[in-house]
Image (cartoon, rainbow, N blue to C red):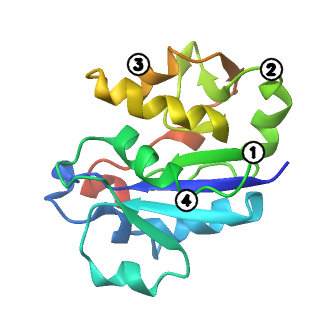
Amino acid sequence: MKATGIILAGGKSSRMNYQDKAWLPYEGEPLIHRAINRLSPQVTQILISKNSSDQRYKKLLYTCIPDLNANFDGPLAGILACSSHVTNPLCLIIPCDTPNVPRNLKSLLLPHLGAADAAIPRFGGDCQPLFILAKTSRLGSIAPYISAGGRSVKGWLRNLSIAQVDFMSKEPFKNVNSPEQLK
């Protein structure tokens, strides 16, 4: 089944001295390029949620979408902003700061989706809520959740039917939060 990829690159990057984390190099490659390279074989459309005015985004061959407001309201606001641009029945959502996201994440989650609204990875009992394979039709539930005061992806997911898929390692889902982790 066809999927649209959404890369979440709209954070403040406060732990990175407010540098746009998407453009920081990891093993010689900007994190955003690494995310695109890992996601592109799995999807037919890529959308990038961003809150930066960095001109390098204009050079990407993908649609870059700012949040509906510039208050850095979190990843859920980025997903909401992208939702109206999705052209496929499924969405595969990942953050840009996880350099080792599986190149086959969609194929690992898809068999578990079934009648659920979304599938997310889990390791050692802990879910990884920013890695989501969701039915696009369920993205419509984000706006009412935010209007009611909700902000967290985990909170939004609690309103959905979720398949949690066990993974043997947390390594693919580790994110880069400090300059030291880029080395």
**Marks 4 and 2, Cα distance to the nearest angstrom?**
24 Å
Identity of the residue drawn at 71% across and 44% down: 90
State the mark number for residue 85.
4
Give the residue type that dot 1 points to. Answer: Lys
Residue 131 horizontal side relative to residue 43, left or right: left
Q: Earlier in the sequence, mark 2 or mark 3?
A: 2
**Marks 3 and 4, Cα distance to the nearest angstrom?**
23 Å
Q: Look at the picture and state if 177 lies above or below 171.
A: below
Count of numbered circles in the view: 4
Q: In front of the other: label 3 or label 4?
A: 4
State the mark number for residue 29.
none
Q: Which residue is mark 1?
A: 106
Identity of the residue drawn at 24% across and 74% down: 53
Instruction: Please tell me whether mark 2 sits on a helix, a strand or a loop.
Output: loop
**Marks 1 and 2, Cα distance to the nearest angstrom?**
16 Å
Q: Which residue is mark 3?
A: 155
Q: Earlier in the sequence, mark 1 or mark 4?
A: 4
Q: Which residue is mark 2?
A: 115
**Marks 1 and 3, Cα distance to the nearest angstrom?**
22 Å
**Marks 2 and 3, Cα distance to the nearest angstrom?**
20 Å
Q: Is residue 135 visible?
A: no
Q: Earlier in the sequence, mark 4 or mark 2?
A: 4
Question: Which of the two residues, 162 or 171, is positioned nearer the viewer here?
Answer: 162
